[in-house]
Image (spheres, helix red, strand yellow):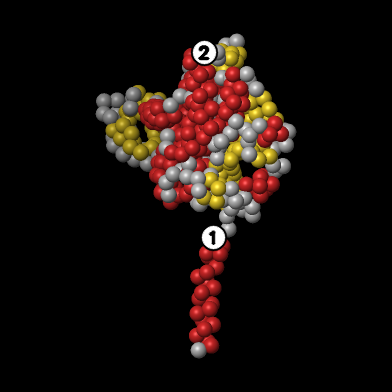
Amino acid sequence: MSKLFYIFFIIAIIFFIPYVVSSESTVLVLEISDPITSASDDLVANAIMVAERDGHEALVIKLNTPGGALDETFTIVNSIAEANVPVVGFVYPEGATAWSAGTMILIGTDIAAMGPHTIIGSMQPVAMTPEGPRPIDDPKIIHALVEFTRERAVMYDRNATLAEKFITENLNINDTKALNYDVIEFRANNLRDLLTQIDGAVIEGVEINTKDANIINHGMPISLSIMMILTHPIVSSLLVMLGIYGIMFGIGEPGAGAELFGIIAIVLGIIGMGFEVNIAAIFLIILGFILIAMEFRTPGFGIFGITGLIGLILGSILLPLHRWDAYDPDFVWTMILSISAPSIAVGIFVLFIIYKVMEVRRKKPMIGAMIGDFAETIDEISSDTKGFVRYKGEYWRAKSDVSIGIGKKVKIIKKDGSVLIVKEVKENK
């Protein structure tokens, strides 16, 4: 009986250990340290999905941003409101700012916090013009923005009056004032301090356990990494400018491939400026196939093929992946391989064709190399009768000014179309 007891005891421990390990709480941390762009809303939505899927106690969004696009900010705030996981806004590190769109995101989180010497405010919208940023004073836009921000402040029991002044007066306040005036709930020295302070908070009837939670930084998918780079205002503007100059250079120097680079650069630039990603990605894929087909029809130095391959791969990455992260990881990898494998296979094939073309071009012309070489007659040849000669294992039609018998050694002196002109070589006896 004692042996049986020990066996049951060991089995119970084996089954109980996974539950003990899985009981450790985790917190997902997303860092936004750049302007809010057309990729930022996808990034936040992806982080919320991961936090919900993996059962994290909360999602902490660290904010250090000068602001950004208004439509994407609305999308982010609405995504946070609809999330099934507590979302914590934290302006950090020390001395960071969350101006404009950053302030609106902070006001729209379940728990708002700021680090030491951080600042929020300056929410009046601006429009980008050739002369630079210009404040928007249109009452229609201002009133809509004020009401949206006030309602978010009321929703989370925050100071709606100050939320309005952030817009109408471009008010700025630091972390101490924000806490005193009920714009935020917590002021923390660092992330661990924040998790300790918010431990036990009840969000929509659920108590969160964050004091000793493991911190997991949110890893950005490759498609979003590319989009974050493309959507940076400097990068997108630079791509458009380089694309225009590339096309101009390509028109002046045709055949260099600069115009193809220019087209792709402009497409990537307008994606970064907010153009519909799916449409641009499909365009890149179609352009890639067309350029690869042109490479096969008019083989050159691989300009068409390489450019087409770049367009094909970029289009394949940008088209689906920024929406696939909600699916099972195995399914995602299957789809990635399904898209990447053909692109890689086509690329290898294009490079092989390019290599063969270059190899052929490096060879000396066959016809010129034949002149002066020797062959052997396998038919009788004369000025009126054409016969065949054997040259390096190949059979060529030939003729001569004089009659030459079978099995004679002849020298190729020139070529008339596809017929070789030969003369007999007299061998010394």
As drawn, the residue found furthest toward the left would be 385
Comparing marks 1 and 2, which lies closer to the viewer?
A: 2
Which tag, 1 or 2, sits closer to the chain's start? Answer: 1
Badge 2 crowding class, 10 Å Cα cut-off, few under 14, some 14 to 19, many 20 or more, is few
Point 54% across, 60% down: residue: 22
As drawn, the residue found furthest toward the top would be 131
The kind of residue tagged 2 is: Asp
Quarter where residue 10 is shown: bottom right
Q: Is residue 326 above or below residue 21?
A: above
Q: Which residue is mark 2?
A: 138
Quadrant for the C terminus in the image:
top left
Q: Is residue 101 above or below residue 344?
A: above
Q: Please state which of residues 17 and 201 is positioned toward the viewer in this rendering.
A: 201
In the figure, is residue 163 to the left or right of 15?
A: right
Point 32% across, 30% down: residue: 398
Q: Please state which of residues 82 and 273 is positioned toward the viewer in this rendering.
A: 82
Mark 1, secondary structure of its residue:
helix
Q: Which residue is mark 1?
A: 22
Q: Position of residue 4 (x, y in %)?
A: 50, 85
Mark 2, secondary structure of its residue:
loop
Q: Position of residue 301 (x, y in %)?
A: 48, 28
Q: Please state which of residues 80 and 63 is positioned toward the viewer in this rendering.
A: 80
Point 57% across, 55% down: residue: 25
Point 52% across, 84% down: residue: 5
Q: Position of residue 29 (x, y in %)?
A: 59, 44
Q: Please state which of residues 98 and 346 is positioned toward the viewer in this rendering.
A: 98
Can residue 167 be seen in this snapshot? yes
| Residue 229 marker | none
Q: CA distance from mark 1 to mark 2?
A: 53 Å
In the figure, is residue 286 to the left or right of 188?
A: left
The kind of residue tagged 1 is: Ser
Can residue 426 be seen in this snapshot? no
